Amino acid sequence: MSIAVFGSINMDLVVRSPHIPAPGETILGSDFVTVPGGKGANQAVAAAQLGLPVHLIGAVGDDGFGQQLRQSLRDYTVDITHVQTIRGASGVALITVDDKGENTIVVASGANMRMSAAILDAVALALADCKSLLLQLEIPYELVLTAAHLAKRRNVMVIIDPAPAPQNPLAPELYALADIITPNENETLALTGIAPVDDASATAAANVLHQRGAQHVVIKRGAQGVVWSHAGQQQVIPAFVVPAVDTVAAGDCFNGALAVALHDGMLMPVALRFAAASAAIAVTRRGAQSAMPNRSEVLQLLAQAG
């Protein structure tokens, strides 16, 4: 059995700067790199690097970036049978990373937002031998919703990363379709109106998401760890203390690793610890997909941490 990821495939244009520029401010950056990204592709690579077969469903453009993105996914052993090529530009993300490892991201969606309902046939095919489906919000929302329905009909676990933070409320049925929803702090605020600044406020926000139908709520709080809520119980999974170099795609790494851990039969607290270790390693490296750790690295960190 494998997992499926239905989501975005982008080329990341990344520049490092001493700090995140304020509105109207021009500053001099340093290193510039062009690296494959996109939340869907990142989560697929994260899972593949941990040794699990992964089907990615999505789209790239018929430009040079599209060719590069396809080849990179092949190099990471991601199955791209269901990745379409659509006329026009591939998705790109313009990313600034400061000296503290924090980042800002602007996405021009390109082919990701030009997918039609026909792509859902590919989703159905990919789900035939999958245990879980990972979804995000960098592709047309109606496709995300329908894909979640397809997964539930096949008893496939649905893991929804509500990122980027939605500008409009999510459909109530999407919460009900989510076996696991994994917002970060900004996304939690956007969804619930509650900023998860501590464990108590994170729990309050989780309760709002439960009331809307979500079963497992996992609020990702960066260096403050993860708050997991399910069936009236809450647990805090501490973050690993590591020197952060680049936080781009850390959340994607977390979701891909969580799907792998659950696929392997780990109980949720153990799976969350495994995912947190994976994300911790990722933030010590520059880049998105190039930062994803392999299984031996994650197990080594877990062993060192006891």
Image (cartoon, helix red, strand yellow):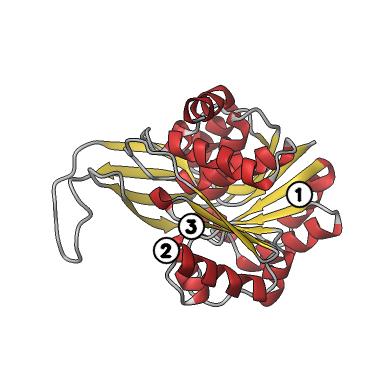
The crowding category of the residue bearing disc 1, from other C-alpha atoms within 10 Å (few below 14, some 14 to 19, many at least 20), is some
Point out which mark residue 122 bears. 1
Question: On the picture, is 288 further left or further right than 152?
Answer: left
Q: Quarter of the image for the N terminus: give it.
A: top right
**Identity, as a three-letter code, of the amino acid under mark 3:** Ser
The crowding category of the residue bearing disc 3, from other C-alpha atoms within 10 Å (few below 14, some 14 to 19, many at least 20), is many
| Percent x, y of residue 152 | 81, 59
Mark 2 or 1, closer to the camera: 2
Q: Name the residue under label 3.
A: 109
Instruction: Name the residue: 19% across, 62% down.
Output: 22
Query: Is residue 16 visible to the viewer in this orientation of the structure?
Result: yes
The crowding category of the residue bearing disc 2, from other C-alpha atoms within 10 Å (few below 14, some 14 to 19, many at least 20), is few
For residue 173, above or below residue 87: below
**Identity, as a three-letter code, of the amino acid under mark 2:** Asp
Tell me the distance, in whole angstroms, between the alpha carbons under discs 3 and 1: 20 Å
Point out which mark residue 198 bears. 2
| Percent x, y of residue 304 | 48, 25
**Identity, as a three-letter code, of the amino acid under mark 1:** Ala
Secondary structure found at label 1:
helix
Tell me the distance, in whole angstroms, between the alpha carbons under discs 2 and 3: 33 Å
